[in-house]
Amino acid sequence: MRAGELPMLRRLRAPADLPAPAPIPGWSVRLLLVAVAVALSLLVYGPHGWFYVGVLLALLAASVPDYLLGWLLILFLALGELGHRSLLDWRVLALVAGVQMLHILAGLSYVVPWRSWVSPAALIAPLRRFIAIQLPSQLAAVLALVLLAPGAHGQRPLTFAAFTLAGAAALAGLARLLLRGR
Amino acid sequence: MSEAPATSRAPAGATTATPRWTLAPPLVAAAALAVLLAAVAVISGSLAVALMALPLILAAAAGWDRLPHADTQLSTRLTLADAGGGRVAYDLRASLPDGVEAVVVRQRLLGGKARELVLAAPQARELAGEVALLHSGPQEVVRFELRLLGAEQAAISLAEDPIVGDLVVAPASTRIGSLPLPRRLQGMTGTHESARIGDGGEFRDIHRFSPGDRLRRIDWRTTARLGMDAGELYVRRTNALADVTVLIVMDSRDDVGEEVAEWSRNVAVKKGLSSLDVAREAASSLAGAYIAAGDRVGFQDLSSRARMIAHAGGNRHLWKLRRAIEVTAPSGVPFRHRRAPIVPPGALVYLLSSLLDDQPAELALRWLSGGHRVIAVDVLPPPRFARADRRQRIAHRMVMMARDDRIRMLRSHGVELLRWAPEASALPLAARLDLLSRPPRWRGSQAAGR
């Protein structure tokens, strides 16, 4: 321990004799999961009522990731979104990004032991994939909201049937992509 | 005085295994949730919910698309090398299967607490480091356990068999100047002066020539001075040289360290200098010193019948002895001897023990009653109470009281005591050995135990 350093601070620093540089404590992934979940709960439910259920779910998802409560939290947020009108605003776009971030963080919490040390390089691939998925998702979200969300006078530019057909076509394309070569 | 411990035999272990992959719950959860959200969106007509499902579907698809193939193999090679200064360098090279994105590495050094690291696949291909050796003897230097992770945590390999780097560490060696000898010296050759008349030793006396004396031993000056007639001759007589037979008996049943708080847990990295470290060093040093003096040395580990080496001399025998001493490990099983191990006639017996129980003391008394000189080498290191609580201190005091009684009883019967572990209040080891090496009348009362 360095002179004048508190034992608590020492625990925040990775041991010097690790066989590879891994300076990020494993619990920070779970802390980030809680932070993102609380922010999204606040966005969907506001600072009262169901928001506290979201906070509780976030804490449980971070403390016992084996129970997959992170994905239950995403469902909880989606159900909360049913009470809102889908409009082209930053809230929906933030939710689209936040949901994937929650999925990544819940998945990492599942595999990263909380007392472990994480290499920054191990987080680059999930981050790169996050960007790769968010770019088309945000573009699709903007397009869908422009074309399908009801306008100020309550009319939709395209019908709901068209929305269903587009979704089905997207799913079929995805299934074809996944089943190739298997 | 003491030389640093050296590593012996650095093994290289190569393994190849087919990882057992399992579809990870995060992938299944994401896919199921995406379908559920899509259904909710269709039923409720909520565009936002449908858009929330979109990244989940894409993420699950990306994970599924990059699932590692089941037949790919994981190859590892762990090597240990002497890094000098009592340190060992380890190097784990892993050839990871395609599709592995990250690796959870569980590492344990010297049997201590396991540490876990999450590394990107390229980083996990070479894991290297150094570790300072704390003990002699057989030990696990490093242990790795790997869990492979696919993209999006879509696939996780079940824990692979641990990759273990074992090493046998040679004990430190102490140079010994004075060697205690048995009560009676036997044999016709050697380096120790016996009480018998013979060749090779120091001048003993002038004596009248008698049949059997060699002519070259006639001392003509003395004969000229003292001889009264032509047939009266005088010879110079010298002492004969003899060798010594030594049996080193090691009580390896328990291995307790300096830290009293660790006596029950016995964790290698926390217990400090241990009694077996001291015992190995003492046995190795004594064996080396006696063999260098041309004596014959035998070795017996009380916890194992397999580790018994008959007495002999020479360098090749010393290697054999040192190897047997190096691999001595605590057995954890109480030994039962119906008869005391056989000791060569006239041998000096070193009993290396922490003297924490009665059985070694009983054996020492049996050898003593058989006419052997027995030196009990106390290998218990001085205690440290840094982390000990009150109950542990009281327990330690009680154990020590019983041990002191045992030592007192041994001394009263004539067993000599030699404390090997360094102690601030005691004489240096060289002085203690010097006292034991003196003839009995000059030795004082059990001075070496101080």
Image (cartoon, coloured by chain):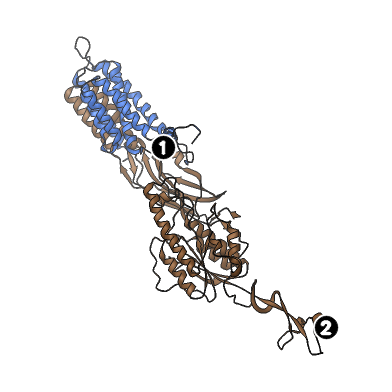
The residue marked by circle 2 belongs to what chain?
Answer: B
Q: Residue furthest left?
A: B43
Q: Which residue is drawn at the image coordinates 53% and 51% (left, top)?
A: B81
Q: Nearer the viewer, mark 2 or mark 1?
A: 2
Q: Is residue B390 above or below residue A174?
A: below
Kindly check if marks 2 and 1 are in contact, taking CB atoms under 8 A apart as contact: no
- Residues indicated by labels 2 and 1 sit on the same polypeptide chain: no
- Left or right: A9, with A40 as reference point: right
Kindly tell me whether residue B198 is visible in this rendering. yes
| Amino acid at the residue labelled 2 | Ala
Please give the name of the residue rendered at 43% of the width and 69% of the height, measured from the top-left corner. B362
The reply to whether residue B18 is visible in this rendering is: no
**What is the number of the mark on residue A117?**
1
Locate residue B340 relative to residue B204 in the image: left or right. Answer: left
Which percent across, then down, holds residue B68? 36, 42
Taking the view exactly as shown, the residue that stands out farthest to the top is: A153
Per the image, label 2 sits on a secondary structure element best described as helix
Residue in the picture at 42% in, 38% down:
B119
Residue that mark 2 sits on? B224
Chain identity for the colour blue used in the image: A
As drawn, B282 above or below B337: above
Viewer-closest of B238 and A22: B238
Residue B237 quadrant? bottom right
Which color has been applied to chain B in this rendered view?
brown
Chain label for disc 1: A
Q: Secondary structure at mark 1?
A: strand
Instruction: Report crowding for label 2: few under 14, some 14 to 19, many 20 or more residues within 10 A (C-alpha).
Output: some
**Residue B33 percent across, percent down from the top left:** 24, 32
From the viewer's side, name the closer residue of A22 and B139: B139
